Image: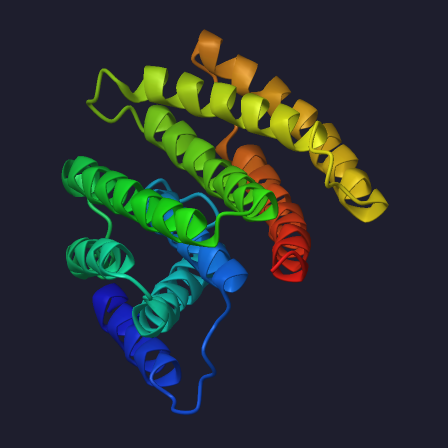
Amino acid sequence: MFQHLLRGMLLLGLLLGALPGQAAISDAEAINRAGQQRMLGQRIAKSYLMIGTQTRSELALAQLDASVASVEENSQLLGDYASSAAIRGAADEAGLTWQQLREQALAAPDKSRSLEMLKLAERFLAQSETLALRIEQHNGSQPAHLVNRSGRLRMLSQRIAMLYLALSWNLPDAELRSKFDTAVEEFDQGLDELHAAKQNTEQINDRLEHISNQWRFARVGFKLTEDGRYVPTVIVTTAESLLQKLEALTADYAQLAQAAR
């Protein structure tokens, strides 16, 4: 029943994504969409683990549905946008991995197959990272770099929650802890870089302050893992709130990048 429900959700997402009349997207929006792909792959894996660990399963199902539909829509828009051979090649490569990731996501969560899911999400992340970088290089402006950097924090909010769930489920991967620690460190560094950006407006600085406050709260929950105690519901809820704030922040940077063209 689970797989049947998800296939129905996917069909709806595909139909919505295939609607005609979508306008071509700008360079700034293309960077934003490619950055979303990075995040969505990690979000799909996180939702998969939420269902498997029975952590807010109903919410996870809704997130999985929305994420699959969003990846499909973004893939279509980015495919239409691709303005160079390098961008087209990166988009095609990510698209091939997405087909495998989607198939895995549509299956009922199984602990024995969870590492396969994480590997596919990792590959899709790396390929979407390359795509975002190619588009940023094509744009060539500092605001475009800030869109990419902010979008990467958006991805890290979901990656950290995903890895936290994997640790709490005791998945057999000796590198999970180091990957988790690296993701937390990268979030710290990315946030510091955005705070220091000279292009920041008052609104952006205000958003960054709210994000920093919530990030400090999340870090308290991370420390509990050192004692083998986990609070997955708290962490996934905090990650969701961070994601919403980072979406708004990335949109602000996208507006700056568009204005700089």
At 49% across and 48% down in the image, what residue appears?
A: 140
Q: List x then y, in percent, for residue 233.
A: 53, 38
Q: List x then y, in percent, for residue 110.
A: 20, 45
| Residue furthest right in the image | 202
Whether residue 230 can be seen here? no
Compared across the picture, whether 200 is left or right of 50 comes to: right
Viewer-proximal residue among 10 and 51: 10
Q: List x then y, in percent, for residue 225.
A: 47, 15
Viewer-proximal residue among 151 and 64: 151
Q: List x then y, in percent, for residue 252.
A: 68, 54
Whether residue 75 can be seen here? yes
Viewer-proximal residue among 33 and 99: 33
Compared across the picture, whether 162 is left or right of 28 comes to: left
Question: Compared to 197, does 130 lie above or below?
Answer: below
At 28% across and 40% down in the image, what residue appears?
A: 126
Question: Compared to 180, does 204 lie above or below?
Answer: below
